[in-house]
Image (cartoon, rainbow, N blue to C red):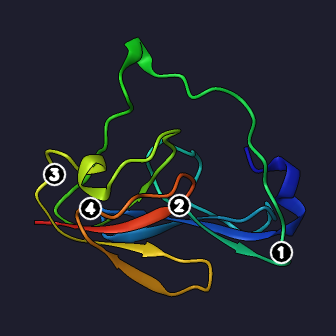
């Protein structure tokens, strides 16, 4: 997935909600890492050496026509959004008892989301699950 920009990636992080710890991937194989798989609906932080653009082409395929499930645990979770239509954060988190949701914006800051705010495909969100 990240091979077109791999030379510009310093590291990739994902948050493991079960163990309350960070998983990390380093393109340099001499540096040990714990992140070995990219999963749909999971949010990732990419630490870059330089600015790069990643274009992903293809179709979003759903198993049996079902949108991939959102696996969250109590506490803080990072989720990824990859829908092709505009949905509110409330629609994305339908059925989840969450206390707050935050978007990591382009300037590196966080924006608290209201239930009616539209999500952005390709963005990551911190969500606190009650």
Mark drawn on residue 83: none
Residue 125 in the image: above or below residue 81: below
Which residue is rendered at x = 86% and y = 68% of the image?
8
Work out which quarter of the rendered image holds the N terminus and state it. top right
Mark 1 and mark 4: Cα distance apart in space: 31 Å
Mark drawn on residue 51: 1
Q: Which residue is mark 4?
A: 116
**Secondary element at tag 2:** loop
Mark 3 and mark 4: Cα distance apart in space: 15 Å
69 horizontally vs 44: left or right: left
Mark nearest the camera among 1 and 4 is 4
Residue 37 in the image: above or below residue 8: above
Q: Which residue is mark 2?
A: 123
Question: Residue 54 placed where, x, y %?
Answer: 78, 54
- If you read the primary sequence from the N terminus, does the residue marked by circle 1 or circle 4 appear first? 1
Question: Residue 4 placed where, x, y %?
Answer: 87, 50
- If you read the primary sequence from the N terminus, does the residue marked by circle 3 or circle 2 appear first? 3
- If you read the primary sequence from the N terminus, does the residue marked by circle 1 or circle 2 appear first? 1
Within 10 Å of disc 2 (Cα), the crowding (few <14, some 14-19, many 20+) is: some
- If you read the primary sequence from the N terminus, does the residue marked by circle 1 or circle 3 appear first? 1
- If you read the primary sequence from the N terminus, does the residue marked by circle 3 or circle 4 appear first? 3
**Secondary element at tag 4:** loop
Within 10 Å of disc 3 (Cα), the crowding (few <14, some 14-19, many 20+) is: some
Indicate the quadrant where residue 75 lies: bottom left
Which residue is rendered at x = 31% and y = 48% of the image?
92
Mark drawn on residue 96: 3
Q: How many marks?
A: 4
Within 10 Å of disc 4 (Cα), the crowding (few <14, some 14-19, many 20+) is: few
Indicate the quadrant where residue 6 lies: bottom right
């Amino acid at each position: 997935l990240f091979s077109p920009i791999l030379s510009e990636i310093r590291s990739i992080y994902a948050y493991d909600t079960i163990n309350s710890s960070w998983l990390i991937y380093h393109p340099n194989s001499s540096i040990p890492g714990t992140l070995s798989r990219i999963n749909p609906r999971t949010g990732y932080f990419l630490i870059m050496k330089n600015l790069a653009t990643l274009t992903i082409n293809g179709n979003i395929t759903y198993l049996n026509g079902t949108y991939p499930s959102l696996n969250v645990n109590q506490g803080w979770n990072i989720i990824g959004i990859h829908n092709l239509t505009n949905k509110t954060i409330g629609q994305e988190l339908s059925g989840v008892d969450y206390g707050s949701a935050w978007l990591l914006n382009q300037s590196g800051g966080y924006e608290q989301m209201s239930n009616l705010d539209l999500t952005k495909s390709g963005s990551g969100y911190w969500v606190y699950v009650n």
